[in-house]
Amino acid sequence: MPVYKYTAKNLESQIVKGTMEAGTPELVRRTLRQNNEFALKIQEVHEHHQVYKMKPMEISDFSRQIASMLASGITMIRAIKIMEERDIKPAIKKVYGTLYQEIQRGNTLSYAMKETGGSFPELLINMYKSGEASGQMEGTARKMADHYEKEHKLRGKIKSAMTYPMILFIITIMVVVLIFTLILPQFFTLFDGIELPAITKLMINISTSMTTYWYVYLIGLLVIIAGAAFLLTVPDVKRALDQFKLKIPKVGKLMKIIYTARFARTLSSLYSSGLAMINALTISGSTIGNTYLQSQFAHAIEQVRNGEPLSASIQTIHGFDAKLVSTIYIGEESGNLDEMLESVADAFDYEAEMATARLVTFIEPIMIIIMAVIVGGIMLSVMLPIMTLYKNIG
């Protein structure tokens, strides 16, 4: 049962504050009146807990169930109750429970989703709000199910493609640490009394420092991680890093394609649902996932507000693929902007998949070469003194 915080006044005109557990604010008001106290302000107290953020595939499943049950004639409140009673993760069940309570109080689904405290993305909330206003809730839910399913597939393909390079990088680090701390020290006693080449001296110094002062390396690593995490919270640093991502060879092109596809699909969904272009641009800009691109939207939105075509406004944003502007221009001229946006989003999804595959084929040999150079350098530093020892023995 909800808990309400109230401020009231008694018969002596004294201010009384407190909390009360009740079904509705009206019940709090009645209870206070029975105690000769008159409510001035009543506010529900929300529990402070960690908010569960719904993942794209979970949002897709949620939207598809909503669309399916609404098409079957089931009311919204009954649909949410059915979803809550299913065998699902406790965290999602809790989110559905909050939705059910809010709808039970007479609120809309979009308002209930907002009251979860961040479980649902702003895009979904605004789309449902638009669907409720236009009476097209079933179609909107179905469209959002497709939208987030495609988002999930794209993320999954990128994640799976980058798994092998990451594993290779971690193995390289582990092999290097193992060689420096366990293998190299066993050869040091063999090299006493002979002149060592520069590369061997360097390896010995590194190995000695890693085995003797390992805690310094560990602390240094933790400081670097903590420092990097802190810097990423600084807006200017985050913006500069996001800008740098777009300039990295090979990687930058892939990131541009991914951001363009995400923007085009979001704008298409919002615009086709009847949302005003200004609002659609504002929401689309916030869902891209790049602060550098997002910072440029204020100027583009201002241009649209002043009557400039969308294609001309988008052209001022640096970081999108050039194909996007041309497609928007054609859509404006033909009057099929929403269809053109959806078409270009599908095209960019495919291009992003292909670009990811090409990037992985580019990264893999680089990682192997780096690992070979490191291991080869270590082997050379060991073999050169051993060859000198053999010569001396001979």
Image (cartoon, rainbow, N blue to C red):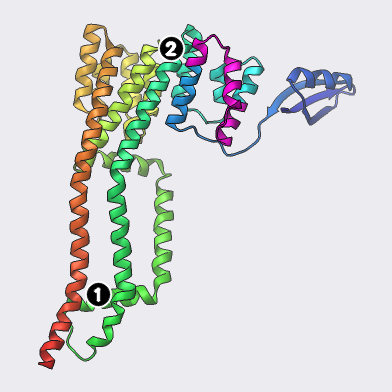
User: Where 98 sits versus 231, above or below?
Assistant: above
Does 153 lie within the magenta span?
A: no
Number of marks drawn: 2
Q: Name the residue at 42% across, 30% down.
A: 56
Predominant secondary structure in magenta? Answer: helix
Q: Name the residue at 26% across, 82% down.
A: 187
User: Where 131 sits versus 388, above or below?
Assistant: above
| Dot 2 and dot 1 residues touching (CB under 8 Å) | no
How far from the left and from the top, in percent, is residue 251?
A: 23, 41
Q: Quadrant of residue 352?
A: top left
How far from the left and from the top, in percent, is residue 216?
A: 41, 69
The residue to which callout 2 is attached is 139
How far from the left and from the top, in percent, is residue 184?
A: 28, 77
- Lower sequence index among marks 2 and 1: 2
Q: Name the residue at 24% across, 28% down.
A: 350
Using a 10 Å C-alpha cutoff, classify the residue at mark 1 as few (fewer than 14 neighbours), some (14 to 19) or many (20 or more). Answer: some
How far from the left and from the top, in percent, is residue 341?
A: 28, 17
Specify the amino acid type for callout 1: Met
Specify the amino acid type for callout 2: Gly
Q: Quadrant of residue 81?
A: top right
